[in-house]
Image (cartoon, grey):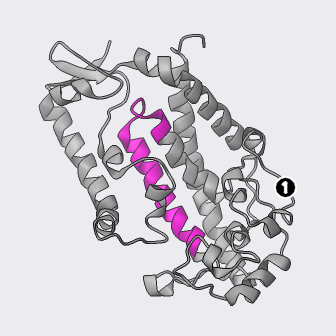
Amino acid sequence: MAHRLTQDQWRPLEAAHHGRVDALTAAHLSRRRAARHHPVEDFLFSYYMHSPSQLRRWHPGPGVDLEGATERAEWKFYRHGGGAAGLDLQAFLATRAPTVRYVRELLGATAARPAHLGCYGLHEWAMVYAQSPDQRRHVDWPLRLGQAGSDEVIESHQIRCSHFDAYRFFTPAAAGRNTLSPTRDSQVAMEQPGCLHATMDLYKFSYKLSPAITSDLKADCFDLAKEVRELDMRAAPYDLETLGYAPVKIETPAGKATYVDAQRAFTARGSVLRRRLIEACDTLLAIAPGR
């Protein structure tokens, strides 16, 4: 039986979530209105398919009915009756059970592997290797070491990127230098928890499970992804100091040590969120049809 919350109980929770997300998205929305772009902070909205308004919606997760929530009667995967609205779990699982199973498989496989911490963020360098300036993803920002210096960083390191969604943006010349050949089909077999992009992707999987998980969990995943993205770009070849991002100079021993320390900390935090997502998947799959 669902737990029932009065409006006096759930409206403050919703308002707190709105305030949290508004603080996280205000700068992005201001830039969007002004048709300006930020190479670091806008990534979570341009790369991931989840809008600020979707992130802002508060969901209590399964097994909770909200009294007086008449506005949710038209929300996807909600049911309304008896003066309250709540998650229509059967409707959600009828559509999303395959997604839940895949997310559970991928996250479980990732969690079972040791973290590899020796990549030094070279994936971003591989995306500009032997490339003309007009082909870069961030054409408005110069390379800190110039093109020749950036190319030398790639040529003097071994690249071992296991994450397909980073690898697919490598330049053709850099792709052949990767010691691995990740594909979409091999993602379950190759994903590992030390990868910054695997940690950022926890946000993607959280919104794929929404509204059948709590919005607190999704916002926690967003928070971590935002911090990880900052390290990702501080260690990238671009010069972003005018935006306030001091570079992590991964071409030096000190920079490598800084990167690994931060990567290790993010791996630990990501492992906690990954476990929470796995537990949420297990709860949903326990009642999914054809489990």
The spot of residue 151 in percent (x, y) is 77, 81
Direction from residue 38 to residue 191 in the image, left or right: right
Q: Is 286 inside the magenta-drawn segment?
A: no
Q: Is residue 172 above or below residue 79?
A: below
Residues rendered magenta in the picture: 207-233
- Pick the quarter of the image with the C terminus: top right
The spot of residue 20 in percent (x, y) is 29, 54
Residue drawn at (39%, 32%), measured in percent from left and top? 211
Residue drawn at (59%, 53%), measured in percent from left and top? 199
The spot of residue 185 in percent (x, y) is 75, 38
Quadrant of the rendered image containing residue 74: top left
Local secondary structure at mark 1 = loop
- Count the labels in the image: 1
Query: Can you see residue 64?
Result: no
Label 1 belongs to which residue? 180
Q: Amino acid at mark 1?
A: Leu
Direction from residue 91 to residue 31 in the image, left or right: left
Quadrant of the rendered image containing residue 133: bottom right
Q: Is residue 117 above or below residue 191?
A: below
Q: Is 220 inside the magenta-drawn segment?
A: yes
Q: Is residue 107 above or below residue 236?
A: above
- Crowding at dot 1, Cα within 10 Å, few <14 / some 14-19 / many 20+, comes out as some
Residue drawn at (45%, 87%), measured in percent from left and top? 242
